[in-house]
Image (cartoon, rainbow, N blue to C red):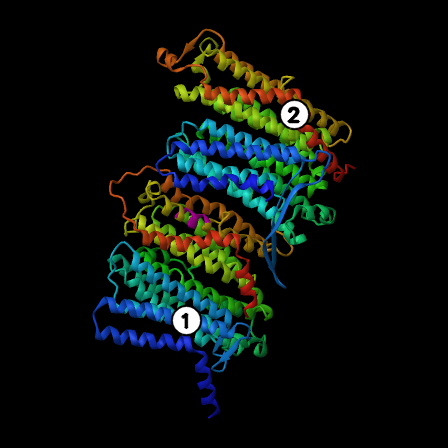
């Protein structure tokens, strides 16, 4: 059996076990944790066997699935999964984040069977989305992701969960439908959903009048998932209402499927359009960076602030793709992995405070450093990593993107240099909102809104939270110091694929 | 002598229809002899099994043969239509099982069984009509039996809505006859398959518009396309859910196929073809948009179901001008299951009284998780989200709409965009059911009692929707082989 197929469908295998565990619900989380650890181990095995010098797809598994052929109608789709430098790190990061989110869900006692079943369903679809190389299979994974997420927000969410979950579903389904139109158009033109076949035919497709429009539809559809301003409004709502582990998955993984798909489909099928509309990607990216950062600055809800900072950091991914340079796209992939780890930690940090006092307004806390020293240390590390301090993974991603986009702007004249300068200004803004938050919440005189009542509840992080946060902080630092660990594989594939992008 | 011999040999090929007629007569006589309900039930079940067997036999005897013209072209039989007849009978069998398993008692008599069989016969005639005379006969048989079925709701409301249905129906039938007479006047033939030979363009183009609009009115009324849908919500409200399975499916399926036959012949003509093409697309756009938008505001299950089924009609209508018979049959095969399962499971949750607000479902999915998940699958399949079969149907429909040059001036592409956007609208109202099931808290202390038979029937209805998604190609492949 193909290892990759095993990674995708392993989480599904434990769902029947959950359903059998009718009485003994306390074993469910243990089984869930073991499943994801096993998945991570298999992921590690794939990484170990992965040939990092080979830019082509590896671990290919291809089986015929649907095949209807006749004179006037044909429909053919294969189950086709594979891995290369673009998605290897993302797959590993996904299994890791699911391990973290299982630990974060340790205290879920409301319908645990349903909760963990949905979590496992989500794990299957997310990883499937990263490795599917057939557009139809990709779409099935991409869209089926919404259903478990909808229920995870709607059932285990906060007070306004009805509104938030349906908004999430509507926005992302709208995006999916646009993508579906593009996929069907591609199928009608070429008779195949296989992206390796489409890659060989991309030049022939360029002559068609609608290809530019199709790229724009694809871009809008994926930008909703990413999310980019102005279609980002579902994200803060969904984050605020979702519980901590769900927020972690939403920010770390679901957003990445959008960014990954732009890179994969852009470089494989739409290279000429990627250059033509590079300015659009970059401008939307920069506007996301600045606008979301300004929003984050104005937020009083800690979770909303972090949600907006996610939008801002995903803007860098878009800018990196828009640069159409090796550095920029390398940076984008790296930034996605790095942001997956950092935003996971950030949402866990919000969860720590919220679990204790059920409040997360920034101005309700002051001087937490005296009360919770370990927590303050971890928070500072995560904040600094997120604002791009050298030595942390966030810095590597952002510096690569900025270097790449200066190259795109000055050498290839894809867009004005001022946009890149504005993006640099975005880093400054992120430093401002993180440091200001740090100063308001953690430093200064110790004071709480509810005084002594909260004071007894606000204890320092416990061992479960320590495990999660220390692991994430270690990874941020480690990837920041040894970026080559994953950048090597990314670079080989990107360098190979960039040949398709010819900048006039 | 030759004619009699011809008729005699034709009768042999009409075995399913003749069998149905015989069973109707037997049911009427049986109803006079005995008053025991159990016997009626057994007879009804046996008749349905008999009819479906005859149809299956016909299907396999015709599989690869070309169309057979009977009674000097008044009736056309083909393997594909035999398949549809199997589907229609299957709906009646589902209705029969449904009625056995439903939580509340239904005061059904042998008259109802006879009516259902007669409607089935009417549907057989409609889909196999070779001339407008047969078509009209069939349509009237379906209509009159529908009025009677609507009347079986046994409440004052049902009686009012049945009367409304009757009045609208009579009006649209009259329009249809008027349209048929115009068609005859213009083409000089009342055979559906016979236009190209006799057609001459003597008349002004505007008369052809008139003829077609009137002719289609009767069929649009049967399939409840907007603006001929006004009876739908009222009648659906008055009728019990089990009968709704029949009333929402039989006339719709047969009407759609009759439209298909007429349209596919009209496309061979110069002006009629274009008018029909635009007319069908326009009606399907209006039906999808209005049906979905009105459904958004519904809080009652019955009205929500009515408007969602109107919206689905719009979607199915798209397959007629794109001339995609295999896809239509494929989608209908699964549409039956989605529809019946939705009606059945809702009725189980609503303790046998489905004319309630959706909030009746509150929290019930937590108490009956298996049934809740089955309803969720059925509903998501209606929206068209993978991995359920409704998604495949939607993909194929969009595929056929975008298959040639795409432009906004092209009404075909425009319909494609409407399909995509109405999917989004339908998400909002369909998701309301799982939302109440799983997210809301349970308020009532009196839980619905659901036995394992009911759950397994629901599972049998719903599981093909998910299994079908992973292996559906054989059915399409087979439909394409069948002539």
> Above or below — where is A327 with respect to B279?
above
Res B483 quadrant in image: bottom right
| In this rendering, position of residue B423 left or right of residue B306 | right
Res A228 quadrant in image: top right
Disc 1 to disc 2, how far (Cα)? Answer: 68 Å
Identity of the residue furthest to the left in this view: B35
Is residue A166 something one can see in this rendering? Answer: no
Please tell me the numbered disc located at residue B213: none
| Towards the viewer: A391 or B452 | B452
Residue at (75, 27) in percent of width and height: A407
| In this rendering, position of residue B71 left or right of residue B149 | right
| Towards the viewer: B80 or A127 | A127
Q: Which residue is mark 1?
A: B53
x%, y% of residue A172? Answer: 52, 39
Identity of the residue furthest to the bottom in this view: B1
> Above or below — where is A448 with respect to B33?
above
Residues drawn in magenta: B375-380
x%, y% of residue B293? Answer: 44, 48
Read off the chain for label 1: B
Secondary element at tag 1: helix
> Above or below — where is B270 with respect to A318?
below
x%, y% of residue A400? Answer: 69, 25
Q: Which residue is mark 2?
A: A397
x%, y% of residue A21? Answer: 38, 38
> Above or below — where is B351 with respect to B10?
above
- Magenta segment includes B399: no
Read off the chain for label 2: A
């Amino acid at each position: 059996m193909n290892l990759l197929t095993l990674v995708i469908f392993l989480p599904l295998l434990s769902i029947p076990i959950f359903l059998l565990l009718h009485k003994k619900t306390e074993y469910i989380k243990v089984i869930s944790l073991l499943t994801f650890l096993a998945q991570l181990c298999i992921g590690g095995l794939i990484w170990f066997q992965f040939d990092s010098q080979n830019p082509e797809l590896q671990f290919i598994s291809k089986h015929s699935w649907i095949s209807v052929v006749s004179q006037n109608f044909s429909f053919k789709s294969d189950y086709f999964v594979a891995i290369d430098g673009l998605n290897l790190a993302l797959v590993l990061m996904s299994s890791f984040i699911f391990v973290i989110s299982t630990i974060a869900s340790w205290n879920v006692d409301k319908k645990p069977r349903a909760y963990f079943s949905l979590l496992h369903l989500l794990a299957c679809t997310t990883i499937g989305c990263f490795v599917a190389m057939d557009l139809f299979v990709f779409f099935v994974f991409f869209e089926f992701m919404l259903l478990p997420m909808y229920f995870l927000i709607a059932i285990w969410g906060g007070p306004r969960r009805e509104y938030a979950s349906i908004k999430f579903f509507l926005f992302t389904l709208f995006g999916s439908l646009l993508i579906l139109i593009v996929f069907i158009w591609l199928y009608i033109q070429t008779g195949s959903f296989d992206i390796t076949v489409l890659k060989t035919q991309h030049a022939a497709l360029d002559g068609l009048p609608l290809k530019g429009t199709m790229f724009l539809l694809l871009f809008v559809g994926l930008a909703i998932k990413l999310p980019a301003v102005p279609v980002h409004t579902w994200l803060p709502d969904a984050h605020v209402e979702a519980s901590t582990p769900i927020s972690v998955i939403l920010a770390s993984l679901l957003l990445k499927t959008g960014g990954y798909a732009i890179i994969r489909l852009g470089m494989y099928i739409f290279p000429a359009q990627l250059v033509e509309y590079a300015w659009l990607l970059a401008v939307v990216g920069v506007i996301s960076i600045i606008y979301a950062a300004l929003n984050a600055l104005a937020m009083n809800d800690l979770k909303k602030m972090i949600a907006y900072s996610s939008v801002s950091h995903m803007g860098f991914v878009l800018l990196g793709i828009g640069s159409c340079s090796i550095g920029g796209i390398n940076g984008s992939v790296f930034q996605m992995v790095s942001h997956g780890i950092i935003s996971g930690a950030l949402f866990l940090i919000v969860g720590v405070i919220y679990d204790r006092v059920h409040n997360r307004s920034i101005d309700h806390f002051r001087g937490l450093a005296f009360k919770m020293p370990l927590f303050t240390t971890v928070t500072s590390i995560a904040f600094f990593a997120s604002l791009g301090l050298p030595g942390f993974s966030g810095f590597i991603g952002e510096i690569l993107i900025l270097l790449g986009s200066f190259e795109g702007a000055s050498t290839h004249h894809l867009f004005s240099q001022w946009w890149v300068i504005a993006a640099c200004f975005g880093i400054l803004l992120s430093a401002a909102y993180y440091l200001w938050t740090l100063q308001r919440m953690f430093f200064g005189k110790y004071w709480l809104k509810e005084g002594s009542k909260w004071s007894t509840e606000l204890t320092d992080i416990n061992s479960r939270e320590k495990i999660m946060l220390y692991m994430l902080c270690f990874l941020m630092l480690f990837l920041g110091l040894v970026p080559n660990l994953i950048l090597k594989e990314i670079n080989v594939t990107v360098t190979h694929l960039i040949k398709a992008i010819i900048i006039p | 002598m030759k004619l009699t011999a011809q008729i005699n040999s034709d009768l042999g090929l009409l075995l399913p229809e003749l069998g149905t007629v015989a069973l109707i007569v037997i049911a009427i006589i049986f109803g006079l002899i005995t008053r025991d309900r159990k016997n009626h039930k057994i007879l009804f079940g046996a008749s349905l099994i008999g009819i479906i067997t005859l149809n299956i036999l016909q299907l396999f005897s015709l599989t690869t043969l070309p169309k057979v013209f009977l009674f000097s072209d008044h009736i056309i039989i083909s393997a594909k239509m035999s398949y549809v007849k199997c589907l229609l009978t299957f709906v009646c069998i589902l209705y029969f099982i449904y009625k056995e398993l439903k939580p509340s008692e239904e005061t059904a008599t042998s008259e109802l069984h006879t009516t259902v069989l007669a409607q089935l016969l009417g549907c057989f005639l409609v889909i196999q009509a070779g001339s407008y005379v047969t078509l009209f006969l069939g349509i009237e048989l379906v209509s009159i039996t529908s009025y009677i079925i609507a009347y079986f709701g046994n409440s004052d409301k049902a009686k009012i809505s049945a009367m409304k249905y009757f009045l609208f129906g009579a009006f649209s039938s009259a329009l249809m006859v008027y349209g048929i007479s115009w068609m005859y006047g213009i083409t000089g033939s009342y055979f559906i398959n016979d236009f190209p030979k006799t057609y001459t363009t003597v008349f002004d183009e505007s008369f052809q518009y008139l003829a077609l609009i009137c002719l289609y009115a009767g069929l649009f009324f049967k399939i409840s396309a907007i603006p001929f849908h006004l009876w739908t919500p009222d009648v659906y409200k008055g009728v019990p859910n089990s009968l709704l399975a029949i009333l929402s499916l039989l006339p719709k399926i047969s009407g759609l196929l009759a439209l298909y036959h007429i349209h596919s012949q009209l496309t061979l003509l110069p002006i009629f073809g274009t008018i029909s093409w635009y007319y069908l697309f326009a009606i399907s756009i209006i039906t999808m948009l209005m049906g979905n938008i009105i459904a958004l505001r519904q809080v009652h299950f019955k009205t929500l179901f009515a408007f969602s089924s109107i919206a689905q009609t719009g979607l199915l209508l798209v397959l007629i001008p794109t001339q995609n018979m295999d896809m239509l049959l494929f989608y209908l095969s699964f549409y039956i299951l989605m529809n019946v399962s939705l009606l059945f499971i809702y009725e189980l949750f609503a303790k046998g009284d489905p004319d309630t607000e959706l909030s009746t479902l509150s929290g019930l999915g937590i108490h009956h998780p298996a049934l809740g998940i089955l309803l969720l699958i059925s509903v998501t399949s209606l929206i068209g989200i993978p991995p359920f079969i409704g998604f495949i149907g939607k993909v194929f429909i969009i595929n056929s709409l975008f298959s040639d040059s795409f432009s906004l001036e092209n009404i075909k592409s425009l319909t494609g965009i409407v399909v995509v956007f109405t999917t989004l609208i339908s998400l909002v109202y369909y998701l309301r059911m799982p939302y109440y099931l799983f997210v809301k808290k349970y308020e009532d202390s009196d839980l619905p009692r659901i036995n394992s038979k009911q759950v397994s029937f629901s599972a049998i209805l719903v599981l093909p929707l998910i299994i079908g998604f992973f292996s559906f190609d054989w059915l399409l492949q087979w439909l394409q082989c069948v002539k």
